[in-house]
């Protein structure tokens, strides 16, 4: 027994290590399969969207789809100009950023440069609560709280409009802008700030002329991610912005975004295989492509323009 | 060299200081607006919905009459779907994170997988709904069922679990692994006995974050084909269902004030569930941290 422990016979030792390594390899392979599955999700999304969209473009000319401005697949005289939906998406995303960018950036500057540490630690998680509220809740708030207020200020505004949806969407993505921008600003080394203070700069000048430019890659990347999030947002615009694909940039009338259209068709009774049903794949493919390009751009900005201070 | 006269210098300095104070005020105002919106939102929802919450509301099915409408089916649907999504996302997420961090940390494959996961996190949620509709509902013949809904949401929140679990695994000090290897442990024994227990609080936080995201999702389940009016409780993994956010959406879209009040009451229930889950995450994390330190 004791002899065995000190010098195990070679053959037996290697057999037991082989027996031990078999389950090890099985486990490693299982974990590998799970990782492969995460890649297959992307492959699945692209395959599903492309497969059905190609069938759609067998019936509808791609040129008409991408240049037309009238979108009426659910009516008897069908037209497939997706620009009507793209206009709605663009309008709401741009207006949401008009709200989220200044408020988010100024909040980030406050938290990173001005706020005392206890204030920052208290305010940051509270701000992030805004990002955790389900979007259907924001939709309710936009339709039943913000819209009536806007309509009281100016009576010419429709019940469903891009403006109130965008304002509320801006509030929703504000924490994303502020949190990511603040992280970038806090990564700027103290020495840069101290150098500027030593030259007699005020806090405003240090913040806007030193810290923000030094953190610009992070801020721009946060901004692009936020736009991508606004483009993919669904429930707020579905509830508050309407279901009228208008080719317009007027924020006071009902519009329809790409995402809201997909919900509209999903809620209806379009049978699988019909042309109405196939449209959602073409629209979703376009939506997926736009957000993918923006996400890649955001990563590229960080890796390409990041300033390294060591 | 141009020298600025004394009086001019003082004038400019006073202006710069004044602008600095104004900017400070502006920054403070932005934070105040953001926090103020949160307060307005919560107070408004509370006032709108609190009168609608009672025992009947929690235990009745949806109804054509707003005062009899309840959230029983939606609550049960939400619980079933989210439990399935949580279990699936936890299993796949932890397995993937372990593979990426412990087995293939610096390989080319791991780099591609990580870029892929970062991009998956940015895919609009409604696209996952369409994926779920084609893969789970039609290709795998699960129908528009609880199971298909759970799987769809599992894919949606998988990147959240993977990212959180990866960070937790990476934070485990190498000395622990090396100590276990020195005692003759195999790779999996090191992972099972050292890495997973140490990383568990971080993994758990990630899973709870993922589940709170899943519980509030509306659009992907509508795209997948969940119902909006359900007067029965789902009794098998293959029965049809609705969830709380879809019920809220449905009531919000109706013109009658009674349904809008029911929607607000539903929202309060949803927010309370989210609050409890997040508080639970904090408590659990603290408890485990004490245990393993």
Image (cartoon, coloured by chain):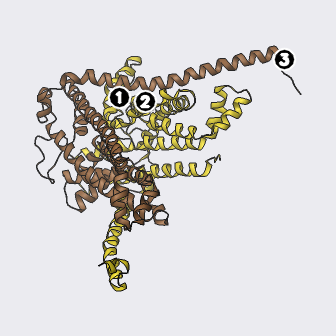
Is residue A194 visible in the rendered structure shown here? yes
Quarter-wise, where is residue B184 in the image? bottom left
> In the image, what residue occupies the spot 33% across and 60% down?
B192
Q: Residue at x 34, y 50 (%)?
A: B200
B266 up-or-down from B110: above or below: above
Q: Nearer the viewer, mark 1 or mark 3?
A: 3
Q: Which residue was labeled with disc 1?
A: A142
**Residue A297 against residue A192 in the figure, above or below:** below
- Spatial separation of the CA atoms under disc 3 and disc 2: 48 Å
Question: In this orientation, does residue A75 appear?
Answer: no
Give the colour chain B carries in the figure. Answer: brown
Which x, y percent locates residue B153?
29, 50
Are the residues tagged 2 and 1 within 8 Å (C-beta)? yes
Residue A263 found in image quarter: top left
Residue placed at 12% from the left, 28% from the top?
B55
Is B287 positioned to the left or the right of B180 in the image? left
Q: Which residue is mark 3?
A: B5
Callout 2 crowding tier (Cα within 10 Å): few <14, some 14–19, many ≥20: many
């Amino acid at each position: 027994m004791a002899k065995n422990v000190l010098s195990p016979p070679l053959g037996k030792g290697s057999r037991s290590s082989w027996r031990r390594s078999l389950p090890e390899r099985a486990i490693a392979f299982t974990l590998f399969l799970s990782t492969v599955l995460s890649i297959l999700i992307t492959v699945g999304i692209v395959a599903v969207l492309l497969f059905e969209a190609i069938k759609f473009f067998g019936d509808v000319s791609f040129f008409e789809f991408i240049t037309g401005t009238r979108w009426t697949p659910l009516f008897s005289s069908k037209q497939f100009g997706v620009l009507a939906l793209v206009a709605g998406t663009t309008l709401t995303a741009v207006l949401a950023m008009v709200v989220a960018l200044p408020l988010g950036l100024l909040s980030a500057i406050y938290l990173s440069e001005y706020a005392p540490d206890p204030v920052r630690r208290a305010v940051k998680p509270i701000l992030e609560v805004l990002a955790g509220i389900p979007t259907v809740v924001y939709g309710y708030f936009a339709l039943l709280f913000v819209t009536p207020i806007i309509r009281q200020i100016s009576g010419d505004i429709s019940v469903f409009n891009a403006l109130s949806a965008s304002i509320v969407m801006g509030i929703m993505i504000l924490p994303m802008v502020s949190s990511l921008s603040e992280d970038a600003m806090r990564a700027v080394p103290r020495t840069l700030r101290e150098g500027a203070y030593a030259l007699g700069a005020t806090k405003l000048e240090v913040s806007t002329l030193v810290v923000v430019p030094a953190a610009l890659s992070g801020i721009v990347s946060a901004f692009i991610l936020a736009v991508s999030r606004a483009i993919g947002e669904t429930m707020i615009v579905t509830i508050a912005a309407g279901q009228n694909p208008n080719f317009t940039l007027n924020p006071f009338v009902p519009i329809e975004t790409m995402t809201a259209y997909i919900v509209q068709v999903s809620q209806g009774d379009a049978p699988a295989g019909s042309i109405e049903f196939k449209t959602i794949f073409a629209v979703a493919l376009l939506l997926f492509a736009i957000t993918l390009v923006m996400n890649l751009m955001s990563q590229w900005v960080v890796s390409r323009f990041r300033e390294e201070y060591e | 060299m141009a020298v600025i006269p004394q009086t001019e210098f003082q004038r400019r300095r006073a202006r710069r200081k004044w602008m600095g104070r104004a900017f400070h005020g502006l920054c403070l105002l932005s934070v105040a607006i953001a926090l103020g919106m949160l307060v307005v939102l919560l107070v408004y929802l509370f006032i709108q919905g609190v009168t609608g919450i009672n025992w009947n509301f929690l235990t009745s099915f949806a109804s054509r009459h707003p005062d009899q409408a309840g959230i029983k089916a939606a609550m049960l649907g939400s619980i079933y779907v989210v439990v399935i999504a949580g279990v699936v996302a936890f299993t796949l997420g932890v397995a993937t994170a372990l593979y990426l961090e412990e087995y293939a940390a610096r390989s080319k494959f791991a780099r591609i997988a990580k870029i892929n996961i970062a991009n998956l996190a940015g895919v609009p949620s409604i696209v996952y709904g369409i994926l779920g509709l084609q893969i789970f509902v039609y290709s795998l013949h699960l129908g528009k069922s609880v199971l298909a809904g759970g799987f769809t949401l599992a894919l949606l929140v998988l990147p959240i679990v993977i990212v959180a679990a990866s960070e937790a695994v990476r934070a485990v000090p190498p000395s622990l692994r090396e100590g276990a290897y020195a005692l003759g442990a195999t790779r999996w024994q090191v992972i099972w006995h050292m890495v997973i227990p140490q990383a568990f609080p971080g993994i758990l936080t990630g899973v709870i974050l993922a589940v709170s995201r899943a519980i509030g999702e509306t659009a992907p389940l509508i795209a997948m084909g969940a119902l909006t009016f359900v007067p029965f409780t789902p009794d098998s993994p293959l029965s049809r269902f609705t969830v709380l956010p879809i019920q809220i959406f449905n009531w919000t879209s109706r013109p009658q004030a009674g349904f809008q009040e029911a929607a607000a009451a539903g929202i309060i229930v949803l927010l309370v569930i989210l609050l409890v889950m997040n508080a639970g995450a904090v408590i659990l994390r603290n408890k485990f941290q004490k245990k393993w330190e």
